[in-house]
Image (tube, grey):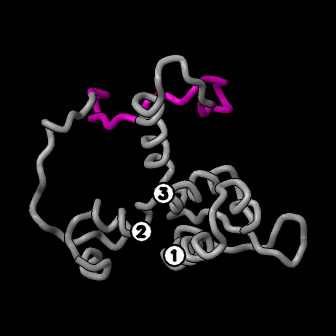
Amino acid sequence: MTKRQATQEPCPVMRTVDLVGDRWTLLILRDAFDGPCRFSQLQRSLGIAKNILSDRLAGLVDAGILTTEPAADSSAYQAYALTDKGRDLFDVIIALRQWGEQYAFDPGEEYRPLIDQTTGEPLRHVAFTREDGSAVRPSETTLGELRPIAAAAR
């Protein structure tokens, strides 16, 4: 199946993976949550080849996830910053991070937790809950019928 065909599938997971589902794109997004980044900063931080970084950044800008803006130092360079659409990926990035904290490290290995600046504590685990606060488990969900996305959802 080509990327064009996958994008036409009525599966939100597949469409999202098409946009942000590779290693470099997710790491670019991770860094973008720290604030606007210049191309050279991203390349240094990630150790990524220029052509791959350029391709991923162009895709994120085309998808409306990142935008370019003048660099903070008033130089001729541009920085990449998250749009509202990009900032809405925060929960996804945090969920991946928290899964990694739980399953991708051996006991005793060190990592840097993400800290809530308001409380000074690590972020609480991302969980989907009902209005009463009870957790929703995978076995308690089912796919609904196909329906159009509301215009306000965009």
Please, is residue 69 above or below residue 125 in the view? below
Whichever of labels 2 and 1 marks the residue nearer the N terminus, that label is: 2
Disc number at residue 30? none
Q: Which span is picked out in magenta?
A: 112-134
Q: Earlier in the sequence, mark 1 or mark 3?
A: 3
Q: Is residue 145 left or right of residue 31?
A: left
Near mark 1 (Cα within 10 A), the count class, few <14, some 14-19 or many ≥20, is some
- Circle 1: residue type: Gly
**Is residue 79 rendered to the left or right of residue 153?**
right
Residue positioned 90% across, 73% down in the render = 75
Question: Quick check: marks 3 and 2 in contact, CB under 8 Å?
Answer: no
Q: Tell whether 64 sits left or right of 48.
A: left
Q: Which residue lies at the image location 48% right of the left edge and 75% below the top edge? A: 63
Foreground residue among 53 and 10: 53
The kind of residue tagged 3 is Arg
Of 25 and 120, the residue lying toward us:
25
Q: Does 123 appear above or below 74? A: above
Q: Dots 1 and 3: beta carbons under 8 Å?
A: no
For mark 1, what is the residue? Answer: 59
Disc 2 and disc 1 in contact, CB within 8 angstroms: yes
Please give the name of the residue rendered at 51% of the width and 76% of the height, measured from the top-left corner: 59
Q: Position of residue 150 (x, y in %)?
A: 29, 70
Residue 117 point in image, percent of width and height: 68, 32
Q: At numbered mark 1, what does the secondary structure look like: helix, strand or loop? A: helix
- Residue 136's place in the image compared with 142, above or below, is above
Would you name the residue on which mark 3 appears?
A: 23
Question: Residue, x 49% and y 42% (percent of image)?
Answer: 94
Which secondary structure, mark 3? Answer: helix
Amino acid type at mark 2: Leu
The residue beneath circle 2 is: 19
